[in-house]
């Protein structure tokens, strides 16, 4: 469905030193710095995948999305999506995609949400029956019934983002780009958006490319992660691959009958201790948790045991450090 080969994009950014004199000088002679936003980016995505496209700020994520959606033209390289070259076949291509930028709106600020939807229907020339069916589905699954008649300016951020996602799907696209779709949302709105993304992916086979800094979104939705840093592709694979490399550490919390002395477990790092509770960090690659529990049960009376995996955020940070980004 998507094949990208050797994408490169460089921006020339004007620079000058602080001060009125430097500002005046820049009117006549400007100096520029070349920023390589994309450097030889190549990957492919199959129909029906949910892919997390991640990286730190300034890595080149949004630039890639803008090239793939036809907004930017790369300096070199090829991009074929559903047989189209986005920046060359834009009129035909955009009928097949939906795009949501978390900090940009495609809704009209002072009119009711439904009026924006009606205008988008006319722009995309969506057949009346298809539009009504899609509107009913989106209104129900994204819980828009109470807000669809309200002006956009009166909506909360979470309500507006749900409407933005609905607007991007009114024309039944086969590919959905989501750039920070849950930024600033409360927990309830995030869960609603995640549930909806999974639904359209499973029931309608919509391919989703998700760009976000919220690793909980990635863990809940993505089947695959593409990591970009400083304009270069650094990692492409499933979350299981990251867990196998960085997720061997687990946190073991044990509650027990009063014990006056700290409990020492060879090979485990004691994070905290009290006479009734202790927490260890254990590398499961070198130490079996069941063996640790067997040791402890012979020394104290265990009341409760909790084992936690390393959070996905920590594993991604380790991946960043490995690539020095």
Image: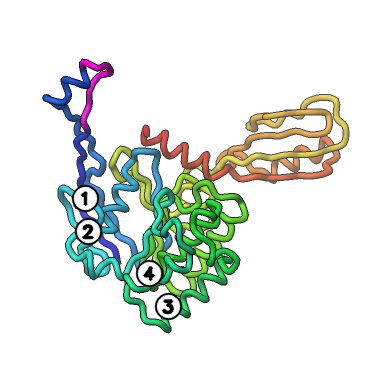
Residue 225 can be seen in this image: no
Q: Nearer the viewer, mark 3 or mark 2?
A: 3
- Label whose residue precedes the other's in the sequence (1 or 3): 1
- Label whose residue precedes the other's in the sequence (4 or 2): 2
C-alpha separation, residue under disc 3 versus residue under disc 2: 30 Å
- For mark 3, what is the residue? 131
Secondary structure under tag 1 reads strand
- For mark 4, what is the residue? 119
- Label whose residue precedes the other's in the sequence (3 or 2): 2
Q: Quadrant of the C terminus?
A: top left
Secondary structure under tag 2 reads strand
Secondary structure under tag 3 reads helix
Q: Are marks 1 and 2 in contact (CB under 8 Å)?
A: yes
C-alpha separation, residue under disc 4 versus residue under disc 3: 12 Å
The furthest residue to the left: 28
- Report the magenta residues as a range: 14-21
* Depth check, front residue: 113 or 83: 113
Q: Nearer the viewer, mark 1 or mark 3?
A: 3
Q: Is residue 13 above or below residue 129?
A: above
Q: Are marks 4 and 1 in contact (CB under 8 Å)?
A: no
Q: Is residue 18 left or right of residue 223?
A: left
Q: Quadrant of the N terminus?
A: bottom left
- For mark 1, what is the residue? 7
* Depth check, front residue: 31 or 232: 31
* Depth check, front residue: 77 or 124: 124
- Residue at 83%, 29% (x, y): give it: 275
- Residue at 52%, 39% (x, y): give it: 314
- For mark 2, what is the residue? 79
């Amino acid at each position: 469905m998507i094949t990208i080969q050797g994408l490169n994009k460089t921006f020339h950014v004007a620079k000058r030193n602080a001060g009125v004199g430097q500002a005046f000088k820049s009117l006549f002679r400007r100096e520029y710095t070349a920023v390589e936003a994309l450097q030889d980016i190549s990957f492919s995505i199959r129909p029906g995948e949910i892919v997390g496209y991640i990286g730190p700020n300034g890595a080149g994520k949004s630039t890639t999305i803008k090239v793939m959606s036809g907004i930017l033209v790369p300096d070199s390289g090829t991009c074929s999506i559903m047989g189209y070259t986005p920046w060359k076949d834009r009129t035909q291509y955009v009928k097949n995609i939906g795009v949501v930028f978390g900090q940009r709106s495609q809704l009209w600020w002072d009119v009711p949400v439904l009026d924006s939807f009606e205008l988008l229907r006319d722009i995309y020339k969506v057949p009346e029956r298809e539009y009504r069916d899609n509107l009913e589905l989106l209104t129900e699954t994204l819980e828009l019934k109470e807000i669809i008649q309200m002006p956009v300016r009166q909506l909360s951020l979470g309500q507006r983002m749900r409407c933005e996602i609905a607007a991007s799907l009114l024309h039944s696209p086969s590919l959905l780009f989501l750039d920070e779709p849950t930024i600033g949302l409360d927990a309830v709105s995030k869960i609603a958006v995640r549930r909806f993304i999974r639904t359209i992916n499973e029931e309608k086979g919509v391919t989703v490319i998700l760009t976000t800094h919220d690793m909980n979104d990635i863990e809940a939705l993505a089947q695959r992660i593409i990591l970009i840093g400083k304009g270069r592709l650094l990692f492409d694979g499933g979350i299981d691959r990251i867990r196998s490399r960085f997720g061997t550490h687990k946190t073991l919390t044990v509650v027990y009958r009063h014990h006056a002395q700290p409990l020492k477990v060879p090979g485990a790092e004691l994070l905290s201790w009290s006479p009734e509770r202790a927490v260890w960090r254990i590398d499961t690659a070198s130490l079996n948790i069941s063996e640790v529990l067997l040791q402890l049960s012979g020394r104290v009376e265990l009341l409760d045991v909790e084992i936690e995996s390393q959070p996905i955020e920590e594993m991604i940070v380790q991946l960043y450090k490995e690539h020095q980004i």
